[in-house]
Image (cartoon, rainbow, N blue to C red):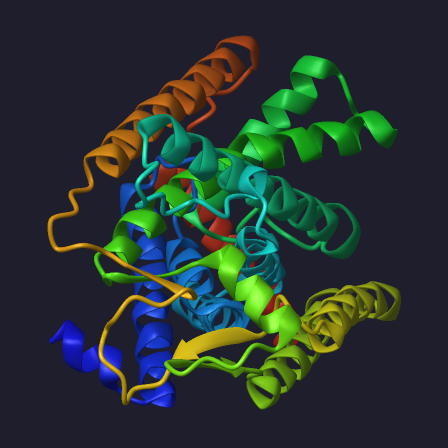
Amino acid sequence: MLNRLHKAPYGVRFSLLALAAVGINMLGLALTQWLGWSLLFFDMIGTAVASLLGGAAVGLVVALISSVLGSLSIHDPTYLVYGYVNIVGALAWSVLPRTGRGYLGCYVFNIGKGATYRRAFSNIVLLGTATGFATSIAAWVITTFILHGHIVVAYGAATATGANNAVLTENLIAITHASDGLAKHFIVLLASMITNIPDKIISTASAVILIISYRTLPNYREQKRIIRENVSLPDAKIVGNRYILLMTCFGQIFLFSYFVWIITKDEEKAGLMLSFSIIVAVLVIMDRIYFRSIDRTHETDLEDSGAFYNVPDDFHMGHHKAVFEDILKLMAIAVSGTSFLIAMSGETACVPDMAESFTSAAHSTNLRRSTLLS
């Protein structure tokens, strides 16, 4: 089955990867909604899979579609605006490893002769931390400057995780007495980082485990050299994805700025969202290296190629499974410890009665939507 998939045309593999990744994102969102008590989102694992395996084009498509479907599933337009965070995550997962630098995760798959637990762990944690930091800033910008005063809960709109994060943020503000000004902005950013960085580390680890099962992995350092020098390969070709990138960029510009205006009725905030979206589009369209990808020609067999790693049949994921388990343990300890300290120091529990909080959030969202429609 995998051998047939490897030999399928590029468009077929692109579409299948995008559909599978969107499905993973939707499963993650449904899981956190069902659990109710989670502080982490788990709705960007599919974006990580698509970006790490297929590059920026498929990653951006997955991020945008997931945001639209997620917004429709929870009946809240603010989730779509937070799709900008998903876009930033797709860019980080696409670009950082493809810089060819070890401290940015270019050895994240770590299946060569030098494969070690330490190398796998460090690459996954570094890439996840960098992506988490970038998405934390994006979420903080939207919460503080774009949707301030127009959302019910922070970081994720009317989701169960968003309600929990709202309580976390409020308790941090109460503990530090940061009622306004720069201090409050810093605490909101800190709350965003507390949840986003562990979430993106777990997403990166999960994506690596899933991608290795695909059996053919990108060699990021070699692909960067091939694209930069425009090297001709007998078993691969450089793919620009120009039209897909253009449609995705213009789609996110329209959707994000339009829905910010619908929610806030504020031309200044809509213009600010438009500016952020245009910045992303310019970075994507103007770049000549990191937003292009290399694809195997489907006529060739799965032989060794400098642009790809072929996972050996006797390869076992012992290091990666151990890394994944240890990351889950560390993140669970970190998030649980933070939640406990905030709950003990604040006036309310960090994880509230979700039946009450989520119902209240959804009710308030419906009231706001009725006002907007009227």
The answer to whether residue 344 of the structure is visible from this angle is yes
**Is 64 in front, or is 100?**
100
User: Where does the image place residue 9, in percent across and percent down from the top left?
Assistant: 32, 89
User: Where does the image place residue 50, in percent across and percent down from the top left?
Assistant: 41, 65
User: Where does the image place residue 177, in percent across and percent down from the top left?
Assistant: 75, 16
Q: Quadrant of residue 88?
A: bottom right
The answer to whether residue 154 of the structure is visible from this angle is no
Left or right placement of residue 41 versus residue 157 in this view: left
Left or right placement of residue 137 versus residue 198 in this view: right
Q: Quadrant of residue 284?
A: bottom right
Q: Quadrant of residue 271?
A: bottom right
**As displayed, is residue 363 above or below residue 132?**
below
Identify which residue is drawn at 25% across, 71% down.
Answer: 303
**Is 121 in front, or is 90?**
121
Identify which residue is drawn at 62% across, 64% down.
Answer: 81
Identify which residue is drawn at 54% across, 40% down.
Answer: 102
Left or right placement of residue 367 versus residue 36 in this view: right
**As displayed, is residue 17 above or below residue 195?**
below
**Is 314 in front, or is 250?**
314
Q: In which quarter of the image is the N terminus?
A: bottom left
User: Where does the image place residue 235, in percent across and percent down from the top left?
Assistant: 37, 81
**As displayed, is residue 182 above or below residue 307?**
above
**Is 367 in front, or is 325?**
325
